[in-house]
Amino acid sequence: MSEKIKLICITPVKNESWILEKFLTATSLWADHIIIADQKSTDNSLEIAGKFNKVTIVKNENSYNEFERTKILLKAARKIDGKKIIFALDADEIFTANFQDSPEWETIHKLNEGTVILFDRININAEQDKYFGKLKMVLGLVDDGISTIESTSQAIIHNIRLPWPKNADYYYFKEIKVIHFDYVIPERTISKLIWYQCFEKIKFNHSDNYLLEKYKTFESIDEFLATFSLIDTKQEWFQGYKNKKIDLTSLKKTFLWWDDEVLEMIDQHGIERFRNLDITRINWVNLALEKGYSNPERFLIKRTLIDKIKSRLKK
């Protein structure tokens, strides 16, 4: 009798209480083990994760580095004995519910070691009736036990999530998708886009125009979605969760930890370093006052008309 292959989900978490319980409930339907690397959460993410028997929590006290956190997650996953498939999902990503009865799902048990598994990740709107931005991503690996993330990619930010063994076979899921909830709470999305700009400005000293092109924010979610061709979602993507009383709709107001970290960057490096970036959706003076920073006026962005033209920002 062949050995049962174990399904493992590895997930980095930082202040994900807005969705974490839903993610863990849905993921527990298929995963034998869920390994969470906590990135110094200050909300109740650890408390939520501790309620689930399948969850193992590992700590990551390092500064933000996606390559390093992937090494931590992989090391923990490989401590589990036996044959395994490792899936790498963020806490705001959930398999479509049709995995429960799709013939595709059963095929993964027949894949050779070293096979890389690809999914379409789709961004859904707040109503969950439309999606946009389908992106094919490597989110699964039939573990061979030896392939390393070091030999695949070592990026600090937006790193590849799993090793790609040399000359790997590929398996592409066509029916089962990964639902990305990133855009269902616009304030969260904007906060993260602002953090990305400031983080990369400090870490890599990218040009303002490069960062504006890469991480442009939006005035409203409706304006943003209008730039895409929206496609209807399928009932089968959600129905299986509804049948099991897993509610993916009523998401909590999210804790915008990115804003606090941007405040720290401004405090350390000065507002002039960031003034031409697209970060004015947030009133930094008011937030600094709320957080108890001294002399909050130093967080004021002073931008001339010429500055706005040069940086292609809206007034």
Image (cartoon, helix red, strand yellow):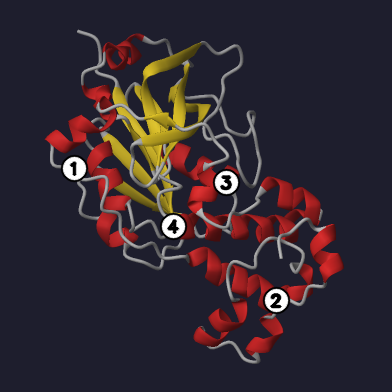
| Residue 228, picture quadrant | top right
Under circle 1, the secondary element is loop
Q: Are marks 2 and 1 in contact (CB under 8 Å)?
A: no
How many numbered markers are drawn?
Answer: 4
- Is label 1 or label 3 in front? 1
Quadrant (top left/top right/bottom left/bottom right) for the N terminus: top left
Q: Amino acid at mark 4?
A: Lys
Q: Amino acid at mark 2?
A: Gln
Q: Position of residue 108 (x, y in %)?
A: 34, 15
Under circle 4, the secondary element is loop
Q: Are marks 4 and 3 in contact (CB under 8 Å)?
A: no
Quadrant (top left/top right/bottom left/bottom right) for the C terminus: bottom right
Q: Which residue is mark 3?
A: 66
- Mark 4 or mark 1: which comes first in sequence? 4
Q: Nearer the viewer, residue 37 or 237?
A: 237
Q: Amino acid at mark 1?
A: Ile
- Mark 2 or mark 1: which comes first in sequence? 1
Q: Residues within 10 Å of mark 1 (few under 14, many from 20)?
A: some
Q: Which residue is mark 2?
A: 268
- Mark 2 or mark 4: which comes first in sequence? 4
Q: Which residue is mark 1?
A: 246
